[in-house]
Image (cartoon, rainbow, N blue to C red):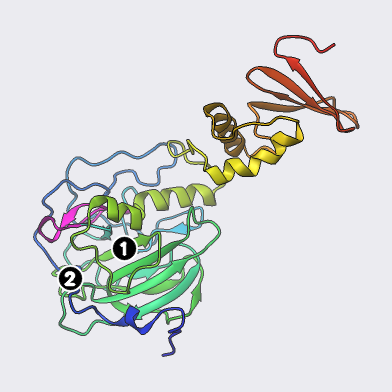
Amino acid sequence: MIRNTDVYPMGMWRRPDDHRGHVPAAPNVRVANENLSGFWKLEGRLGRLVVPRPQGGGGPGFVVRNGVYVPLEYVDPSDPLQGGYGFLDWTDGGMTPHPGADLNSGGSCDSDLGVEVVASVAGVVLAALPWDGHTPGEGSHLWVYYDDPVCIEPAYGHFDHLAAFAVYEGQRFAAGEPLGRCGKTGGWQCAHLHCELLRIKPQSWWQWPYGWSTAQVQGTYFSPRWWYEETVLKAGGQQGGDDVRTSTTPEEREAIKPYMEQLGVAVNMDTALMQKACLAYYRDENPGPAMTGEYPWGAEAGGFVRQEFTARTGEWHPDGTTYWVEINKEKG
């Protein structure tokens, strides 16, 4: 098997000497955070369960919304991410905020055994690491990179405890294509699919955030609930409700500044007023300056554009002339 060691050094494939893997542990000591009832019911936002869910559920085939798949077959369509540990549940005796979600289907301990695992969206296989047959932890595990344009953000996907691989390193795949089979490799009592979605390239293919803080995990891993839901919304041409952006970056505000200068206005883009105007621009994705209001004046050729500011109105005409009038006053 050929591996590109220029991009990914061989150390990525070596289990660290002090590696503390995803070791089977006692049941959750805290309430589950993200085994969510009603996941992907797009008419509303999601709530949280008040108690952990036991393994169970099940349903025909795959849950898919707008071409985005829940990776495990036969999950409960009303609660497809339900299972064991949820995102940020405390594992390893309270030493590790769980960096992913455990998926289950069926109602018995090994009902998931051999169940198909598929790609949620399009991407490429980065690493396929078979279990050595005795070391507890990840078992046979797979790393992929989801770079499909529908992704709310690209992500490094990680699947643990597989019974078999259906792909090879370097292979490109489409949404819904088989990646492997669910299992319990790594010494687990019951079969399940451990899924992670990382914001950044892992330190190694054996990364496990033992001893990390909740903030460190949140900075490195996506909430699976958030990533899947927002990717589904984006794939369907929709915009998330509660997750609508509420701020802009200095780089975004600087990109808007030339439009302001075009109107003869020298402004500080970091003032509260201009941050609000810039936010309105990016939310609405309107062309032209970041204004509190912008609309064409006159449908015929040669019409002009009027922009409403807090204190006054500007009119930009095709001849390059800008006229300013006070708001609520007629232009002379």
- Identify residue type, mark 1: Cys
Q: Is residue 259 above or below residue 144?
A: above
Is residue 131 one of those drawn in magenta?
no
For this orientation, the residue located farthest to the top is 329
Residue position marked by numbered label 1 in the rendering: 195
Residue position marked by numbered label 2 in the rendering: 20
Cα gap from disc 2 to disc 1, whole angstroms:
18 Å
Mark nearer the viewer, 2 or 1: 2
Most foreground residue, 202 or 164: 202
Q: Could you say where residue 326 lies in the image, as x and y percent from the top left?
A: 72, 13
Is residue 92 one of those drawn in magenta?
yes
Q: Is residue 166 above or below residue 33?
A: below
Q: Could you say where residue 27 lies in the image, as x and y percent from the top left?
A: 10, 57
Residue 129 appears anywhere in the view: no
Q: Quadrant of the C terminus?
A: top right
Q: Is residue 194 above or below residue 322?
A: below
